Every structure is written in C-alpha cells, then in structure tokens.
Amino acid sequence: MELPRRKFLQLAGAAVAAPAFSRVATAQTYPTHPITMIVPFAPGGPSDAIARVLAERMRRSLGQPIVIENVSGANGSIGTGRLARERSDGYTIDLGNSYTHGLNGAFYSLPYDVLTDFEPILPLVASPVVLFARKTMPAKDLNELIAWLKANPNKASAGAVAVPLSNTLFQRETGTHYVLVPYRGIAPAIQDLVAGQIDLMFGSPDALPLMRAGSIKAYAVASYTRLALAPDIPTFGEMGLPAVYVPAWFGFFAPKGTPKDILGTLNAAAVEALADPAVRSRIADLGMDIFPPERQTPDALGALVKADAEKWWPLIKEFGIRAE
C-alpha cells in the first residue's frame, strides 16, 4: 500500500529529526545516573582531598552522586589513560593536575595526547610545593640544609612520586646530590618522612599541620609568594633560588568529544561548589588557592595546559629528566 505523499514526507522528516531530538533530550536531562570521577593518585593525597570536597558539593547541583575512583600509578598517567578511553557522555571525568595533563607528555611515551585527547572543564586550585624534612634534620634553615647536603653527598634520601622534577631542579640549582626513593603517592611518602625513614620530601601544603605539630620541618615553598597559612616559610626565590619553581594546579577534564552543553553543566556545578563558603574554607585549610571566578572556564584551563607544555617540555628534555 502506497502512503500519501504528505504522510510520507512527515514520516521521513520525523526519522531525520529523531537523532537530533534524542541528543537534545539527552543533554537536557543530563545527568540521569551517577558520575565517576577518576582521581589518578592513591587515596589520602591532595588530589583525593580536593576531589572528595568538590564531589559532595557538586552532587547537590547535579542531582546525582559523584563516585570517586582512585586509579594510581605512573605519576597519574594510568588513571588519565583510562579517561582517554571512556565514552564522551559526561559520565566519567577526572581530577587532573599539571603533571597528568601537562608534564607527563614530556616524561612518558603515552598512548594518548595530553594536549588534544581531553576536554578541559575548568581549573580548580593552585597548590604550591613545599620542601619538607624529617624533624631530626640538623639544619635550621634552607642555607644550612644546602650546606649539610653538600657536606654529605648522597647520604640523604628524598621521597619522589614517579617523576623527580622538583628534586632535579633543587639539586641542579644548589649543586647537591641525594638519593631518590620512589613512591606511588604523596601520602605514603609523608608517612615515611614522619617516621624518619626518608630525609626530605617536596610535598603539598596539606602536610602543614604535621609541621605545626612538630612531626616534620619545612624549609621553603616553591611559589612566587609566601603561603598565607605559613607566612614564616620563605620562598625559594627569597633564598636566592628563583628557578626552583614547579607548576602545581588541579582541574577537571572530560574525554575528547564530550558535548559542550554537558561540559557547561559540569562547569556550572563546579563553579557553584567553588563559591560555597564551606568548600572555600576546606580548600584554604589544605593550603591551596582557588582560581578566581573569571578564570574558572574551559578556555582558561586549556590555555594553562598549553602554556605549561610550551615552557616545561623543552626544559625537561634539556635536563634529561625521565620517569622512574
């Protein structure tokens, strides 16, 4: 039986429009089930702390829980590689940082491209790196530490999480030499530092409470300014070592091809979370700085990744730094 021409055209038009309508309907109802947030490091470190604070607050905006999955190894490249293989539907994101989505591109031969295989959602926080030491280290300040290290070459040990960029810069600038002990995450390294199993550790400001308790020492911060939570700790620049600076930021990423409206939903939920006084207080307690509202955009995070690659990849190659 032949269909009338008008009816045929109506049905044909509906068939063509159906996929587009389906995509729109999906975007309008996103999310309809839990979202997975990959944290590419072991539990207990700064990435894990940031993820859990934000995931809980974003749940209120999105109406769905965010499930944290810690996928550690190879300086975060294993977890990041998993994100690269996920569907571009907004149901898997990761909390990456300046290593996982930037510097690792120079350290490793990766099966994905850190510059093109991900969609930036927004930068979250910046986290300066602090040089900590065991509490029994005899040096009273950074200058005394450098003198002690020079007098005791290769007798000290330092925890390093996969790629020793901070340690390499510090040793090159000071002419010191010590043994690097690899760790899968910052948390276990800090535990060994407290126990006196290692001597030094470049760590994040969330370890400052241990310093205040007298469990470890802090000698300098690799930042342009002193930490608000610890204004007595000088910067490396103040101590005559401005080159000892490593970028340390955290941001949200999605797989390549994730629709822009879904990225916008995730961005809005994260922006709302970062504006929450309780979240801001918790992040301040970790010693980290939230990016200003005008920089909480996908473009800002994309520019950050690109700028770090342009600056650091040539230097990493020049220094001959390799992953442990």
Image (tube, rainbow, N blue to C red):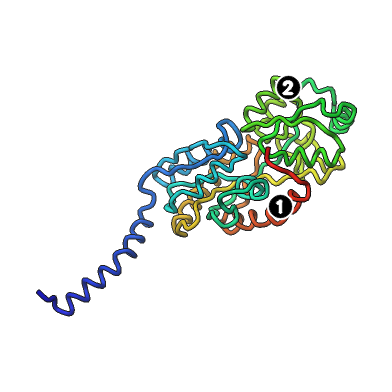
Query: For the point 59% across and 41% down, which residue is it?
Result: 76
Which amino acid lies under the numbered mark 1 shown in the image of this protein? Trp
Taking 108 as reference, is 266 left or right?
A: left
Q: Residue 313 carries which label?
A: 1
Q: In which quarter of the image is residue 215?
A: top right
- Of mark 1 and mark 2, the one earlier in the sequence is 2
Mark 2 residue crowding within 10 angstroms, few (<14) / some (14–19) / many (20+)? few
| As drawn, 92 above or below 45 | below
| As drawn, 231 above or below 259 | above
Residue furthest to the bottom: 5
Query: For the point 59% across and 52% down, which residue is it?
Result: 114
| Alpha carbons under labels 1 and 2: distance apart | 37 Å
Q: Mark 2 points at which residue?
A: 214
Which amino acid lies under the numbered mark 2 shown in the image of this protein? Gly
On the rendered image, what quadrant is the N terminus found in?
bottom left
The picture places residue 233, in percent across and down from the top left corner, at: 78, 34
| As drawn, 10 above or below 238 | below
Query: For the point 58% across and 45% down, which residue is it?
Result: 96
Taking 212 as reference, is 152 left or right?
A: right
Q: Using the image as rendered, state which of residue 252 and residue 77 is in the foreground.
A: 77
Mark 1 and mark 2 in contact? Answer it, CB < 8 Å: no
On the rendered image, what quadrant is the C terminus found in?
top right
The picture places residue 43, in percent across and down from the top left corner, at: 55, 32
Query: For the point 53% across and 43% down, which residue is it?
Result: 276
In this view, the mark in front (1 or 2): 1
The picture places residue 25, in percent across and down from the top left corner, at: 33, 58
The picture places residue 137, in percent across and down from the top left corner, at: 80, 23
Mark 1 residue crowding within 10 angstroms, few (<14) / some (14–19) / many (20+)? some
